[in-house]
Image (cartoon, coloured by chain):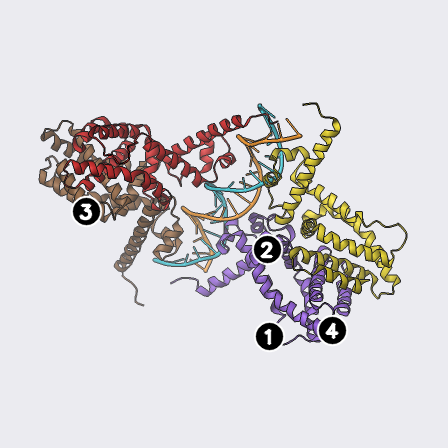
Chain colours: A brown, B red, C yellow, D purple, E cyan, F orange
DNA sequence: TATGAATGAGTCTTCATTCAT
DNA sequence: AATGAATGAAGACTCATTCAT
């Protein structure tokens, strides 16, 4: 067998790492972090327990990477220009994207909500999370303010809470929850 | 012949059981079920590990009693007459009560949401939960239907989801979340 | 209620003690000593756990009393005169009595055999047991010796072993083991 | 890719498993199943508690493997041809083998008798045991029947019971029990 | 890189025993 | 004499992590 180039090795590493992250996310979401043994992740991923420690320092750091990369993904499509307000059309697109993400990343949302509910675990991510989310609330608040809303800040928080609730209900009952119709209602009521 | 009457024993039992349930709810809510050892519950409750098993068959049955009694409590104020629709005023009162409960039972909500997110645990409660909650969705759907809403079923689910989301956000940040103002907005937008 | 006389109290004590001993024997025999909790004995006897400690110092001393009184009972019908040999008729009667005891005290035999098999437990009773049983082997040996047997000592031990084996098999399968016919064979072959 | 071949891993596993089984048999026999903690087996075997669970699902399944393999071993030398009777010489050899096994496998017999005496434990093995032992009783019964015995079935059961009793007594007192002489007597009296 | 045997701390649970009443 | 709540030590079992190969 010819020796592999450094690039090939890197590709293998990244692929394996991806498989582990993917498997762990699926299991953490379904069973919870503390109820998911490393041995189960290894078995489901078709590798040995030991190998996981080749890629991650600990079970906790595996969780950390899952959450970090998931949070980056969440905001990746939601870029905005510093200092400028958000337009109605941009907001509509934001809602559309959010509903799509709920559907496509439901496993991540499930895990993420679980963690938010456990303050002693979530505190690790709190700062990173707030950094990413606060600017959006500010934008939204300004939008409602300009529209002449009575409680622009409350409305912005309500906007976020309603999206969270929709995500939660979709996760709990993906087959019966009328996501599309609710999207229509959401756009009418919040924009 | 016995130096303590049966009633005295019962009172002692009920008091101690209450303390254990209360302590366990607080810990399960904050740390999660699987991340809360029985030994910690015992320590916080100021009793020995063994005593918990005098009152509950297992850690799971302790959880079960917490959830059961919490669910009963949730619907206790929300009685309605079979076969009759719900009026606008009743709905307003329902929302008021719900917001109060969010504030007062936030620990229970925290635990409850956590469990909903873990299907393999929640399946134990699923049936009981659906029995208690489905009639309300039916009532709500009928209310929106009579009001001439476009998607009455979706709106009813949206109503529930929004309340859930509000609860979730209040739990995550009870000190900064503008619950009162959001209640005003909620009533305007959903009733 | 008139005060009870000392004798009445004693009778009550003895009755309760008897019930406990009886219940414990039944459970120890069926489930084994280490697999039988005191709480189960109390429940089956219809009394409280604490009361057992009113009559017995510990679980072990309860066992000790069961075995002691059982062993006394075993040899009670088998008295013999010191210094005189045993006659053929006496031996026949001894076998008859033994077969009867196997049937009537099968629970005690079950427990007793169990203990013999666990040297670390049985050592407590070993001395008492040997004191009671050795004289019989001596008698039996003399009997076979006088009959001109080749190996009188071995035959005496064989006699005892065969009785034990019959007891063991009867215990294991009381409904199908042909005790009566085997008694006939035993008398033919060993006397 | 793996630095140990599958065969190497298997050899390691089998060796370690054998050590655990051997140690557990010795302890279960001497102290009884319920009076032998896993921690003691681990200590005696020179390994950690946890490792035992790498090889056996539970304490019960460890017992099960001991009994299964012991029972297989017991009958391994006692093969017979289906449909044909047993000859006098074969029976003599059977007795010789049995006496040898009593001496060599006394630990297993000790454990096995203990279990027979506890119906709630033994029921697990009952079926397997009867499957292996019943054919032999049938053979023996036929042998005695052809010899013109009065109670061939009872005599066959007596044969088995006597062997059991001999085993029991040898176990209880291996140093003083005259096994060889009793074998001579057994052959004279039962064949 | 990859394996899985091995460890040991920690988890749930049981149970003999004590004690206030 | 009698109860059963309470304790604490110990038992079965799990699992994150290490390490020799």
SS under mark 3: helix
The chain that hosts pointer 1 is: D
* Cα distance in 3D space between marks 3 and 2: 60 Å
Measured in 3D between alpha carbons, the distance from the residue under mark 2 to the one under mark 4, in whole angstroms, is 36 Å
Residue depicted at x 74% and y 58%: C163
Q: Earlier in the sequence, mark 2 or mark 4?
A: 2
Query: Which residue is denoted by mark 4 in the rendering?
Result: D148
Foreground tag (3 vs 1): 1
**Quarter of the image where the N terminus of chain A is located:** bottom left
Q: CA distance from mark 1 to mark 4?
A: 22 Å
Q: Do tag 3 and tag 2 residues touch (Cβ < 8 Å)? A: no
Rendering coords of residue B15 (x, y %) = 47, 27
At label 3, counting other C-alpha atoms closer than 10 Å, the crowd grade (few under 14, some 14-19, many 20 or more) is some
- Dot label at residue A104: none
Going by the image, does B152 lie left or right of D98?
left
Q: How far is disc 1 from disc 2 in space, using C-alphas?
A: 28 Å
* Residue indicated by mark 1: D82
Q: Residues within 10 Å of mark 4 (few under 14, many from 20)?
A: few
Name the chain under label 3. Answer: A
């Amino acid at each position: 067998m010819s020796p592999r180039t450094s690039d090939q090795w890197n590709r293998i590493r990244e692929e394996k790492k991806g498989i582990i992250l993917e498997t762990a996310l699926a299991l953490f979401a379904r069973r919870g972090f503390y109820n998911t043994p490393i041995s189960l992740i290894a078995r489901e991923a078709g590798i040995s327990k030991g190998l996981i420690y080749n890629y991650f320092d600990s079970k906790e750091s595996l969780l950390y990477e899952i959450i970090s990369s998931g949070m980056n993904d969440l905001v990746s499509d939601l870029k905005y220009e510093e200092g400028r307000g958000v337009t109605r059309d941009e907001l509509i697109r934001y809602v559309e994207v959010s509903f799509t993400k709920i559907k496509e990343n439901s496993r991540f949302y499930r895990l993420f909500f679980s963690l938010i509910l456990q303050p002693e675990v979530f505190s690790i991510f709190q700062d990173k999370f707030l950094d990413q989310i606060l600017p959006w609330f500010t934008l939204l608040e300004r939008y409602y303010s300009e529209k002449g809303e009575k409680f622009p800040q409350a409305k912005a928080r309500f906007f976020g809470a309603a999206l969270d609730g929709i995500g939660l209900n979709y996760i709990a009952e993906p087959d019966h929850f009328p996501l599309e119709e609710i999207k229509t209602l959401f756009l009418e009521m919040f924009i």
